[in-house]
Structures are given as C-alpha cells and as structure tokens.
Amino acid sequence: MDKDRVEGKVKDVGGRVQRQVGEWTGDDEAQVKGAAKQVEGKVQNAWGQAKDAVKKSSTSEAERDEADGEEAERRRKRAANE
C-alpha cells in the first residue's frame, strides 16, 4: 500500500471530524477548513491508489522511477501553493 493512500485517508478522516465539529459548534470557518482537508485527503488517497495500480502493472524499473519523480514534483508544487 502506498504511503499517499494512508496519509490521504488520515487527512480525509481528520477533515470529516473538523467539519463535523464545526457543524455542531456553528463555526463556519472550521466547516470550510474541514471540507477542504477532506478533499485534499481524497485526492491524495486517489493518487496513492493510482500509483499502486501503476506499480502493479509496471514491469520496468525506469517507469517506476519516472512516476516517483513526477510524484516528487507534484509534492513540491503542492507545498509551494500552501
């Protein structure tokens, strides 16, 4: 199982909790932040699933290296946007 799948699921669950607490307390900002965190987690989880599928079907070491390089680039871009 890919690390992104685990991290994504953790963010998804954390976002759900944050959103729900915001609903219970009437805190609109917490609801929005929780929903955003949920979406981020779902995207990261999907990315991890896609990577797992590629690794399973891939027979070439070079293809795996390229996917890892693309992942690293996406993470750098994501970090720069946060």
Image: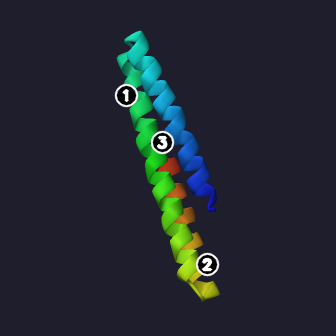
* Image disc number at residue 52: none
In the image, what residue occupies the spot 44% across and 52% down?
43
* Three-letter amino acid code of the residue under disc 1: Val
Q: Give whichever of 44, 80 is nearer the camera.
A: 44
Q: Position of residue 78 (x, y in %)?
A: 48, 51
Residue identifier under label 1: 32
3D distance between C-alphas at marks 3 and 2: 26 Å
Q: Give whichever of 49, 74 is nearer the camera.
A: 49
| Furthest residue toward top | 25
Q: Earlier in the sequence, mark 3 or mark 2?
A: 2
* Three-letter amino acid code of the residue under disc 2: Asp
In the image, what residue occupies the spot 64% across and 85% down?
61
3D distance between C-alphas at marks 1 and 2: 37 Å
Q: Position of residue 35 (x, y in %)?
A: 39, 33
Secondary structure type for disc 1: helix
Q: Position of residue 63 (x, y in %)?
A: 56, 83
Q: Residues within 10 Å of mark 2 (few under 14, many from 20)?
A: few
Q: Earlier in the sequence, mark 1 or mark 3?
A: 1
Q: Earlier in the sequence, mark 1 or mark 2?
A: 1
Q: Position of residue 82 (x, y in %)?
A: 48, 42
Residue identifier under label 2: 65
Circle nearer the viewer, 1 or 3:
1
In the image, what residue occupies the spot 48% across and 67% down?
50
Give the colour scheme of this rendering.
rainbow
In the image, what residue occupies the spot 52% across and 76% down?
54
* Image disc number at residue 82: 3
